[in-house]
């Protein structure tokens, strides 16, 4: 069964910023005069993805590699519906979890415990499911001592450990992963990789983005190379 169908998808962005207040608009009027004098690329269209097509079967692990700006993260944001394509169609099946921007749903004034429930609900977990997994989430993050402390007092490493732990304990059919195996110290990175292997071996369909080519070659069963928004190569890692 196909878990992902990515059909002739393109995504464009207009370069430059949009102004939303009177002050910004007045400031921008002055900038436009200077831009006309020296030239500007503000009205230029940038194609982050250009007519990209691929499919992912149930239980498959697909790696996506490429240089910065190749379209990797845009692909995952389109799959997770953070943004939508300019053209083309995307179909996904099953329950999805995304490890894209760790801790994006965290509130700094809430405790780790409260953020587990908040972030878990954002990722689609019911309260009963969070209750069932709570102890495992805290144990995996190694934050038992600090779970009732506001996360604004966490170090960056503690923050991302808790975020990864919450997201990786979602029971998902389809998992989207973007460079999250580089979080924390080396021992925690190995722990994250072991968790990802566990999810893969349990039959979870995974799309994995990384600049770590060793991780892609060892973890994935198929890979796509993106260059300037297009598929340049596809096959065995």
Image (cartoon, rainbow, N blue to C red):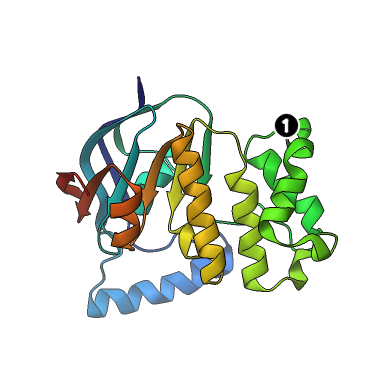
Note whether 64 is above or below 94 in the view shown. Answer: below
Q: Quadrant of residue 176?
A: top left
Q: How many marks?
A: 1
Q: Is residue 61 left or right of residue 140?
A: left
Note whether 95 is above or below 177 in the view shown. Answer: above
- Callout 1: 10 Å neighbours few (<14), some, many (20+)? few
Q: Is residue 63 left or right of residue 19?
A: left
Disc 1 target residue: 126
- Quadrant holding the N terminus: top left
Identify the residue at image location x=55%, y=58%. 191
Relative image position of residue 212 (x, y in whole percent): 33, 63
Q: Residue furthest right?
A: 148
Relative image position of residue 72 (x, y in whole percent): 32, 52
Q: Is residue 141 left or right of residue 46?
A: right
Note whether 122 is above or below 164 in the view shown. Answer: above
Tell me the element at label 1: loop
Relative image position of residue 89 (x, y in whole percent): 31, 28
Identify the residue at image location x=63%, y=61%. 161
Query: Is residue 104 shown to the viewer in this render?
Result: no
Q: Is residue 72 left or right of residue 166?
A: left
Is residue 99 or residue 193 the one in the foreground? 193
Q: Residue furthest left?
A: 232
Relative image position of residue 232 (x, y in whole percent): 14, 50
Q: Residue furthest top?
A: 1
Query: Is residue 118 shown to the viewer in this render?
Result: yes
Is residue 206 or residue 70 the one in the foreground? 206
């Amino acid at each position: 069964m196909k878990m992902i169908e990515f059909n002739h998808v393109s995504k464009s962005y207009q370069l430059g910023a949009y102004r939303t207040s009177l002050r910004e608009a007045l400031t921008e009027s002055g900038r436009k005069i200077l831009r006309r004098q020296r030239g500007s690329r503000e009205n230029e269209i940038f194609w982050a993805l250009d007519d990209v097509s691929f499919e992912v079967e149930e239980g498959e692990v697909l790696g996506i590699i490429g240089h910065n700006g190749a379209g990797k993260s845009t692909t995952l944001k389109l799959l997770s519906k953070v943004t939508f394509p300019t053209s083309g169609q995307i179909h996904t099946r099953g329950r999805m979890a995304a490890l894209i921007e760790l801790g994006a749903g965290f509130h700094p004034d809430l405790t780790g415990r409260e953020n587990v429930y908040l972030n878990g609900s954002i990722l689609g977990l019911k309260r009963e499911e969070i209750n069932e997994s709570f102890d495992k989430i805290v144990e995996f993050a190694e934050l038992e001592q600090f779970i009732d402390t506001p996360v604004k007092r966490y170090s960056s490493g503690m923050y991302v450990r808790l975020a990864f732990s919450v997201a990786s304990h979602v029971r998902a059919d389809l998992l989207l992963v973007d460079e999250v195996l580089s979080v924390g110290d080396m021992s925690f990175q190995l722990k994250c990789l072991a968790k990802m292997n566990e999810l893969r071996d349990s039959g979870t369909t995974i799309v994995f983005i990384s600049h770590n080519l060793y991780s892609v070659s060892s973890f994935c069963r198929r890979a796509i190379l993106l260059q300037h928004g297009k598929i340049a190569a596809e096959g065995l890692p």
